[in-house]
Image (cartoon, helix red, strand yellow):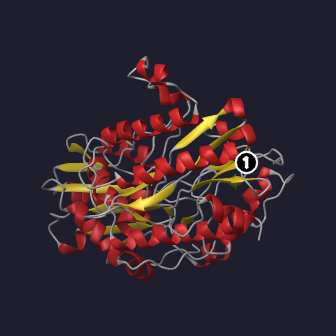
Amino acid sequence: MKYHQIDRDLFIKNRSKFMAQMKPKSVAIFNSNDIYPISADSTMPFAQHRDIFYLSGVDQEESILLLFPDAPYEHQREMLFLKETNDHIAVWEGEKLTKERALAVSGIKTVYWLQEFEKVLFELMTHSDTIYINTNEHYRATVETETREARFVKWWKEKYPAHTVAKSNPILQRIRSIKESEEIDLIQQACNITEKGFRRVLSFVKPNIMEYEIEAEFIHEFVRNRSKGFAYTPIIGSGNNANVLHYIENNQQCKAGDLILIDAGAEYANYSSDMTRTIPVSGKYNDRQKAVYNAVLRVKNEATKMLLPGTLWKQYHIEVGKLMTSELLGLGLIDKADVQNENPDWPAYKKYFMHGTSHHMGLDTHDYGILTEPMQANMVFTVEPGIYIPAEGFGIRLEDDVVIQESGEPFNLMRNIPIEVDEIESLMNS
């Protein structure tokens, strides 16, 4: 890992919150991710399953966390099972967690090697009635690869069919969505690294550079600031490429007079940032681009003010739609007849702003959170309206990450990242 060690008190608090919601005489088990193969002996870079990381801080493969609050003995209530390290592994793969180091990282005193898992689990299952399995139930999830977690669930159901099954995901959806102060600090650090990357890009962009060259500037700045890299696949869309919402090829030339939509954010310690800015290739917006840009910025600023405790996500998007409708009327992109005759299920503004405005953010870029429940303080949301005009050859999206406060407007974690037209033009021409 490149990041500074996180205080284990965070993971102790997270486990305490989870265990407080477990049923009596129940066990919860969390598996690390696999290292996924590419071909021959090549693999994808390891990325830890966010749930086991959230609850333990363990950031390596072949790890299992077991929680059993009602275990007969105290040392059985929190357990880690890790891949046994040795000198050979240290030489070929690098240092893995020792039992002592695992305690320092997680605050968990009982640490076994992985080969002892089945034996220890058998003993604990004789004292338990229920097991919590960790299925992926995120509303955006599409899982086609069998995960280590899924293999464990199949094995466990065959081995212990008499036990009741419960789901860990509903608990995690709630507790992970409300951030501890340490988590907000980590997301802030990711945002600070993103700021450094963006400022670097502002001084780099000029006509005829390639989109992938901008991507390279970001990754350089991210890695040199202790990030593993992008929190998600970056979008660097110049000209009409900005009108493809998930454009990731980043392989076209940036032409004079065009705009570049940049949706890119650094990760730090597995926590995400998520930024979008739209900048002029030539260092100056024309009048039409500026008018649309400022319309998007006004929607973003007003939408941000709505992110308050008690706000319902669905109603919030209806209200943002009203703001966007007003701006599109002002820009001449729609008229009153379009609004009067609109389909309620697909309002007129959706022709130019077809995606949502906000999503939870944290360990995952599209983080856990139950969208049918009211927003609460210390939830982190993006705010990302956009206007996309293929007929005019450009699209504009602006996005910040904000923390909902107990009272008052949300706190903008990207408050120092340039966003006003004058500031961006000044920095690009300095």
Q: Amino acid at mark 1?
A: Asn
Identity of the residue drawn at 62% across and 40% down: 246
Relative image position of residue 330 (x, y in whole percent): 53, 36
Q: Is residue 316 left or right of residue 113?
A: left
- Which quadrant holds residue 376? bottom left
Q: Dot 1, how many residues are within 10 Å of its Cα: few (below 14), some (14-19), or many (20+)?
A: few
- Residue 135, can we see it? yes
Q: Residue at x 82, y 51 (%)?
A: 210
Most extreme residue toward the top is: 341
Q: Position of residue 64 (x, y in %)?
A: 40, 61
Indicate the quadrant where residue 249 lies: top right
Residue sitting at x 42%, y 77% = 105
**Residue at image location 40% in from the left, 39% down from the top:** 139
Left or right of residue 33: residue 212: right
Return the residue nearer the eye: 305 or 142.
305
Of residue 376 and residue 92, the one placed in the foreground of this image is: 376
Query: Measured from the top left, where is residue 2 in percent x and y?
Result: 59, 74
Q: At which x and y percent is residue 261?
A: 66, 48
Task: Tell me the residue that label 1 is attached to.
Answer: 286
Name the foreground residue: 157 vs 293. 293
- Front one among 161 and 139: 139
Q: Of helix, strand and loop, which one carries label 1?
A: loop
Name above or below for residue 301 compared with residue 388.
below
